[in-house]
Structures are given as C-alpha cells and as structure tokens.
Amino acid sequence: GACKVMADGEEVSMIYSGQFLGEIGVLYGAERIADVRAVGDTELLVLNREDLRLALDMFPGLYGELKRVAEMRVEQFNEKDVWGKDKANVDLGAGSMSEFRNFLQSMAEAVKASLKEQ
C-alpha cells in the first residue's frame, strides 16, 4: 500500500511500501508535522516507544539514521517548495535501518502466519 502525506490540507508527498513514518513524534516527543492517510489497502506495523527503545538497543546506529531522517523531513516541511511525491521516502540501503526493516518484515510475516493458523 501507500500513504499520502498531507500538510495544511495539501498533499505534499507519498510514502510507499517498506517505508516508515512517525519518527519525529517518537524521537522528539513532538507533535506531528503532517497527517498521513492510507491510499487503498495498506498494512502498517505499529511500534510504541518501548518497542523502539528495544530496537535501538538491538541495532546499533539505528538512532543516528532515524534522527537523520527526522531532521530531513522537518527541513522539507519547513521548506514546502522542495516537497515532492517521493520526498518522504528514504533510501534504506545497507546499515542499521535496512537491518531493522528486514527484522520487522520477518516479524510481521511470522505474526501473519500465526494468525492464519488460529
């Protein structure tokens, strides 16, 4: 699935499969800077603050990568003229962020499989 990123009632970007959102609020305890709406069927994995703390312990370097993304998104929000359809997406490449995403995808698949068995 995909999600529209809305600021001041205007679509400013899209977030696609495999991406994440909400890091600004979780990292900084700040209010959200944009609203996000699902476009069609979308599956989301929700992590609470405690889940993220555990992940930060498990994946060294993850905090720095999340902070970099949060700062980039805040900067883009403050300069709305640079927003674009894919500006909210992040190149996860290699590193802690990619490892964490792969871990979450494996966990989500395991949960789905266990739910099907019930």
Image: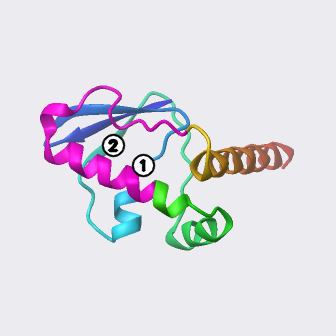
- 30 and 114: which is toward the camera: 30
Label 1 neighbour load within 10 Å: few <14, some 14-19, many 20+: some
Q: Position of residue 2 (x, y in %)?
A: 45, 30
With 77 as the anchor, is 71 left or right in this view?
A: right
Residue, x 26% and y 64% (percent of image)? 31
- The percent coordinates of residue 98 (x first, y second) are 61, 44
Label whose residue precedes the other's in the sequence (1 or 2): 1
- Please tell me whether mark 2 sits on a helix, a strand or a loop: strand
Question: Is residue 77 inside the magenta stretch?
Answer: yes
Name the residue at 55% across, 66% down. Answer: 52
Circle 2 packing at 10 Å, graded few (<14), some (14-19), many (20+), is some
Secondary element under disc 1, as helix, strand or loop, is: loop
- Mark 2: amino acid: Val
Q: Is residue 87 left or right of residue 116?
A: left
To which quarter of the image does residue 68 belong? bottom left
Q: Residue at (35%, 63%) from the top-left corner?
A: 25
Q: In the rendered view, tell whether residue 77 sits above or below residue 30.
A: above
Q: Disc 1, disc 2: CB below 8 Å?
A: yes
Please tell me which residue is depicted at 35% across the width and 59% down the height of the picture.
Answer: 24
Kind of residue indicated by mark 1 = Leu
Q: Position of residue 58 (x, y in %)?
A: 68, 66
**In this orientation, does residue 70 appear?**
yes
Report, in whole angstroms, how far the alpha carbon at label 1 lies from the one at label 2: 9 Å
Disc 1 marks which residue? Answer: 21
Residue range highlighted in magenta? 66-92
Q: Which residue is mark 2?
A: 36
Residue 104, magenta (yes or no): no
Q: Nearer the viewer, residue 41 or 16?
A: 16
Task: Using the rendered view, name the quadrant where residue 32 is placed.
Answer: bottom left
